[in-house]
Structure formats: structure tokens, C-alpha cells
Image: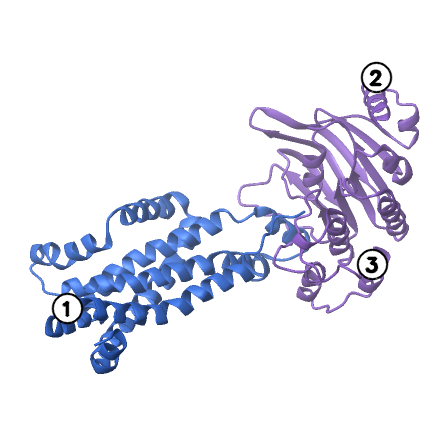
Chain colours: A blue, B purple
Amino acid sequence: MSAIDILIKYQAAFAAGLLVTFHLAAIVWCAGLVLGSVLGTAGAKWRRTVGLPSRLMSFALSAIPILVVLFWLHYPLQSMLSVVIDPFITAAVCLSIVNTFAVADTVRGALDDFPKQYVIAAQVCGMNAKETVVHIQVPIVLRQVIPSLLIIQVNMLQATLFASLISVNEIFRVAQQINSQIYKPVEIYTALGILFLVVCLPLNAAAHMLKAKYTRDYSER
Amino acid sequence: MLSGVNLSKSFGNQQIINNVDLQLEPGQISVIIGPSGSGKTTLLKMMALLEHPDSGRIDIDDTSYTFPLKRGQTPTPPWPKVTVVFQQLFLWPHLTLMQNITLPLKLRGKDRSENLEQLIHLFAMESFINRYPNQASLGQRQRAALVRALVLQPEYILLDEITSSLDVEQVAIILGHLRELANKGIGILTVTHLLHFAREAADRIIFLDKGQVIESGGKELLVSPKQERVQKFLSVIEAAS
């Protein structure tokens, strides 16, 4: 039985798993992009009170594997607090936190590095603060961060696989369950790879396309 | 009239501008010359209120700005009545040269300024007007930055070394245009290191050194300066060129 045969035979199970994966990813993407953008903007504005703690948190999260954070939130923390939370919610919260700080780091970095001279040029052309933000700062910053944000979101999609380890029935767990029935690990995980390739490749391609289009070489001759 | 009275400015312990008085009449071209680090650009920024003096007063026609400002006081910005073209130009990189020029106009509710086409033609920009700044040469970008300021029809325009990378022909075009603007009543204050530019353009020349006006006067200042420091500076520049 080839990887394609497995994909066809277990298409219902894979589709259900993929749906959970997308559901989880959608929550993580939305929460991370919205909260991360707000946190990043606040961090650039209030560097000491918001920016510094946010950077420290981001630094810590980038050093600790997501799997460890996920396990810690699911088992020891819930045991300590004597609560039981749906693993899907635990995974969504954990990955959203990681995504939020990753997005915040990117947004804050772009805002911190924004050349103030462009704002001065807008001022002397009579543009007010709102016009400067809308027509100068936001377009330049967006062009700079969109490709990085897309790549972060692809990484977050791949990170949803860790949710299987706390029993969320997402695509990787479905693959494990199928494997436990028919024991064809090479074919099953190849099928999984094909699925992720189909989903992630267009996203990665979009990131590269946007990067090529918007983050042109701005250095002047 | 645009004038600065007793302007002083320090950065840390370093006094950059020290009790400088400067007047720019409508229709006048004033040229600031002086060695590097003499405070020319800082003075220009102060006159445009982009940099607030530690003390002194700036008058723009009937509006007076006294420094230091009172706590919580925010002066009404004088832009684009007073505008600046910087040496580094600061063209917005995500917009074409044309969009750089027309964006401030559009935000003022004017799709096209009556003098836009005329300016584009005058500065021979037709062939590169739709390029992005990073696709244009320095001379092309300098022309675009100048046109971006001019289409807003400022009453006072402050120019920081804007001819530094232009060829002789372009400098001549800009000179002619500055004279035309001055004839229309626009006051022009420019910083330059090009003595021939100063000689051709200036109604008034101000020599600045170590944050102080050492000497000022008409074009004769370039021929027979009274101060030894100015004589020395001019002879060095003449010898170098």
C-alpha cells in the first residue's frame, strides 16, 4: 500500500484530523497576529514598561522547546491547580502565546528600526500624524514584516503537530492511530508529509513572493 | 519674514549654536557657508522648527515661537509654509518619485498642482518620474525631493546641500529656478559648500563657524571678507577647487 493509497483509503480520518489541525492553526494565527501586533506596537511605544518584559518573555520562549511548554501547561500546571482543561484549549493557548510573542518581536523590531527621517519628511510636507501613520509608516512596516509573519505562521502550523502529544486529535495523532492499526510508518508519514507539503508550500511561496515584491532593495544608488 | 533671534542649542555639553541671529526676507536667497560641524544643518532645522532651540525666538511672519517652550506647550507646526529639503532627501521608498511628489498634494485635496507639470518639465524628470527612489540616480532623487517641496508652494524653503551631487548643468537649472522662486516672493535659505553656487545665487551670505555667525553680508563677502577666519576658509576652498 503506497502513501497515496493510504491517503485515499483513510481520507475521512485524514480530513477529520486536518480539520482539527486547521481549526487549531486558525485560532493560533488569529490570536497571535492580533495580540502580537498590539503587543509589538505597545512594546515599541513603551519600551521599558512593555517592550523589555515582552522581549524577555520572547527570549525565554524561543529558548524553551514548544513541546516542553505544552507538556508543562497540560500536566504539571493543571495538576498543581487541580483543574482539567480540554487538551485542544491547552494547545490553542500554548501555541497562541508562542505565536503572540514571536509576532510581537517581529513587529516591535520593524517599528524600532523604522527610519525617523521618513516621518520628518512627511512633517515638512505638511502631513499630520494620522496621515503619516497611514500613508508612510504602516505601508513601509507592513512590507517589511509580512514575509516574516507568513513564515512564522507556517512554523506555527507545523507546531500544531505537538498537540498530538497531549491527545488532541489533529492530523499527526490521526496518522499515529492509523499506523497503530496497519503498521506502515514509512507510507503513513510520507502521506502526512505530502499533506503538509500541499498546505505549506503555497504559504511559503506566498511569503517568498511577498518578500521579493515588497522588501526590495531600498538602498539607494 | 522668517527670523531667528538669539538662537542657542546644545547637545549634552557641546554648544552647537551660540546666540545666532538670522533673517530671511520673502524673495531673498540667503546662503549659509562654513566648515563641517559648524552647525549649519542644526541651524536650518531650528529655523524650520524641526529642532527646538534651547533659547531664543523664531518669528515666521506674524507667528512667534519663544524658547524654551512653556511646560506642555506645543507650537503649531509651520509646515509646509516653511519646508525643508534635506541633503539625504528622505524620499519614501515604497512610492515612486511621482507618488512621492503627489501624495502630500492629494492629502491637501489637490490631485494635481498647477505647477506640477511645469516643474517636472523644468527639471527634465519625464523619463524617470515613475521610478522608485532606489531605481533612480542621486541627481534624479535630488530633483524629485526638490519638486516634492516646491509643488506645495511654500513661502520659505530651506535647502540643505541639495546641489551636492548634481552636475554643473543641473546646478545651473536649480540656480535659475531658485532665482525664479525668489522673484515670486519665496524666501530661500540654503546651506552649501559650493562657492560658485553661493556666488551665483545669494542675496545674502552667512558664514557660520563653531555655532556662531562670524560674518554676514552680500556677495562681496566672498570677494573681500573682513574676518580672518572667513578669509582662511575661502582660500582653502578656492585652492581645493
- In space, the residues marked 1 and 3 are separated at their CA atoms by 67 Å
**Image coordinates for residue A197, horizontal then vertical, percent:** 35, 68
Tell whether B158 sits left or right of B235: left
Q: Which mark is residue A216?
A: none
Mark before the other along the chain sequence, 3 or 2: 3
Of badges 1 and 2, the one in the foreground is 1
Residue B54 left/right relative to A68 = right
Q: Nearer the viewer, residue B218 or A166?
A: A166
Q: Nearer the viewer, residue A152 or B4?
A: A152
Residue highlighted by disc 3:
B119
Q: Is B193 positioned to the left or the right of A162 in the image?
A: right
In the rendered image, which quarter contains the N terminus of chain B?
top right
Chain for mark 2? B
- Report the residue marked by disc 1: A86
Is residue B26 at least partly visible in the picture?
A: no
Tell me the crowding category of disc 3: few under 14, some 14 to 19, or many 20 or more residues within 10 angstroms, Cα based: many
Indicate the quadrant containing the C terminus of chain B: top left, top right, bottom left or bottom right.
top right
Three-letter code, disc 3: Leu
SS at mark 2 in the image: helix
Name the chain under label 3. B
Q: Quadrant of residue B11?
A: top right
Q: Give the label on residue B228, or none.
A: 2
Dots 1 and 2 on the same chain = no
The residue at the point 55 percent across, 62 percent down is A213
Residue A96 visible here: yes
Specify the subunit that label 1 lies on.
A
Amino acid type, label 2: Glu
Callout 1 amino acid:
Asp
